[in-house]
Image (spheres, rainbow, N blue to C red):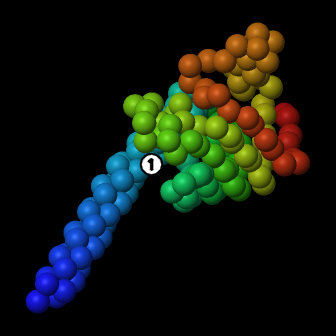
Amino acid sequence: MRRSLRFALGFLATGALFAATVLGVSAVDRALAMRMAELKVRGMAALEQFLGRRVDYGSISPSVLRHIVVRDLVVHSRDGSGGDLLTVRTLKVRYSLLGLLASRDPVGALREIRISGAALRLDLDADRDLLDLVSRISSSGARTAALPASRLDSERAPSSMV
């Protein structure tokens, strides 16, 4: 009798531990999904605000622990009539999971940006504001609030200037 009672209590304790684990993982998953959604919205809004141009994408695929992959990213020209300013086949954004969960600023959790399959088409007159922006950032060495502490890598990509 005592042995079966110990077995039943052990079984109940194991079941309770399992249920608590499932509930905990579920809560973390919900919190992470909310942060990921917020990161998508705020990240794209920050990019549009920083560039002063509309940005579209084909898909965003998050990896829960380390990165987000954006496919078919398009940065449109300022007036929309000059074609696409930038097209990127794949944009991989690495982030800090701890920073994403612990911070109210998901953009601040970004750590690295990788670009592959990019094509840049600049109109030296129409895109003067972007050229000035790049010049200010590179000459001052200062970061703006819109940009996280990131490293930008790009594979060899074709570009053209008009």
Residue placed most toward the observer, 30 or 87: 30
Image position, residue 43 (x, y; %):
51, 38
Image position, residue 118 (x, y; %):
77, 49
Inspect this view and state whether residue 68 appears. Answer: yes
Q: Pick the quarter of the image with the N terminus.
A: bottom left
Which quarter of the picture shows residue 110?
top right
Which quarter of the picture shows residue 78?
top right
Secondary structure category for the residue under label 1: helix
Which quarter of the picture shows residue 27?
bottom left
Residue placed most toward the observer, 65 or 79: 65
User: Can you say whether 94 is above or below 61 in the image?
Assistant: above
Q: Residue at x 74, y 47 (%)?
A: 115
Q: Pick the quarter of the image with the C terminus.
A: top right
The kind of residue on which mark 1 rests is Met
Image position, residue 101 (x, y; %):
43, 41
Q: Residue at x 61, y 26 (%)?
A: 147
- Taking the view exactly as shown, the residue that stands out farthest to the left is 1
Inspect this view and state whether residue 80 appears. Answer: no
Label 1 belongs to which residue? 36
